[in-house]
Image: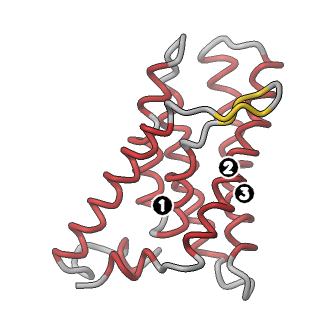
Amino acid sequence: MSATEAGSTMIGKPARTRLIAFVAVMSALSNVLAFFVIPAGAVTLHLIQLPIVFAGLAVGAVAGGLVGFFGAFTMAFTLAKPNPYLTLGNAILGFLIGAFYARIKGWSRKPIVPQVISVVLAYVVQAPYVYLTDVYGMGMPQVIVVSIMGVLLIEDLISALISHLILYRIDVGAVLAQD
């Protein structure tokens, strides 16, 4: 758990306000990114996970989970068949990325290694939820869900690499925690 999430008594009001603003801005950015797609051959990539992954890695599990939950609303409810399960699935992703990264960030002198491992581990834990809710909750064909899950992994890894490029230069958690 990062210093900003350790408890409201450990951070001052300005830091709390910056943390809330950070979560709100990252959630809004995630919702805006839902409108943009990147064509990549037979599939399209969405980068709504970028702010979710970034928040989890930069600030921690709670921020990642909140950005995942609130940042997935546009994607969840603007699909041809709205999928409310996306909000909880992305909350799980963001929370787990932050939780795993907090536990393993000291494993390597190169921060990208634990960052990517955290994203992959979070994906692996989130994957059964995605599969079950899409197949049984939404009635989607299994073959479609499996292909979506492959694209999700690619999107998560791209988001981890972009997040790393930013976090390599700026310690967002430290900036937010300043009083």
Q: Is residue 136 above or below residue 157?
A: above
Which residue carries the number 3 mark?
Answer: 121
Q: Residue at x 74, y 65 (%)?
A: 117
Mark number, residue 55 = 1
- Answer whether labels 1 and 3 touch (C-beta < 8 Å): no
Give percent across and percent down for residue 102.
Answer: 57, 74
Task: Give SS at disc 2.
Answer: helix
Among all residues in the image, which is located at the extreme left?
A: 13
Amino acid type of the residue that numbered disc 1 sits on in the rendered structure: Ala
As measured in the structure, the alpha-carbon distance from the residue carrying label 2 to the one carrying label 3 is 11 Å
Callout 1 environment at 10 Å: few (<14), some (14 to 19), or many (20+)? many
- Answer whether labels 2 and 3 touch (C-beta < 8 Å): no
**Which is in the foreground here, disc 1 or disc 3?**
1
Q: Residue at x 71, y 73 (%)?
A: 112
Give percent across and percent down for residue 45.
Answer: 68, 35
Amino acid type of the residue that numbered disc 3 sits on in the rendered structure: Leu
Pick the residue in front: 95 or 17. 17
Q: Is residue 107 above or below residue 42?
A: below
Which residue carries the number 2 mark?
Answer: 156
Pick the residue in front: 144 or 154. 154
Q: Residue at x 48, y 62 (%)?
A: 61
Pick the residue in front: 108 or 6. 108
Identify the mark nearer the N-term, 2 or 3.
3
Task: Give SS at disc 3.
Answer: helix
Is 169 displayed left or right of 116 in the figure?
left
Task: Give SS at disc 1.
Answer: helix
Q: Residue at x 47, y 46 (%)?
A: 68
Give percent across and percent down for residue 93.
Answer: 58, 49
Give percent across and percent down for residue 149.
Answer: 75, 34
Q: Is residue 119 above or below residue 39?
A: below
User: Tag count in the figure?
Assistant: 3
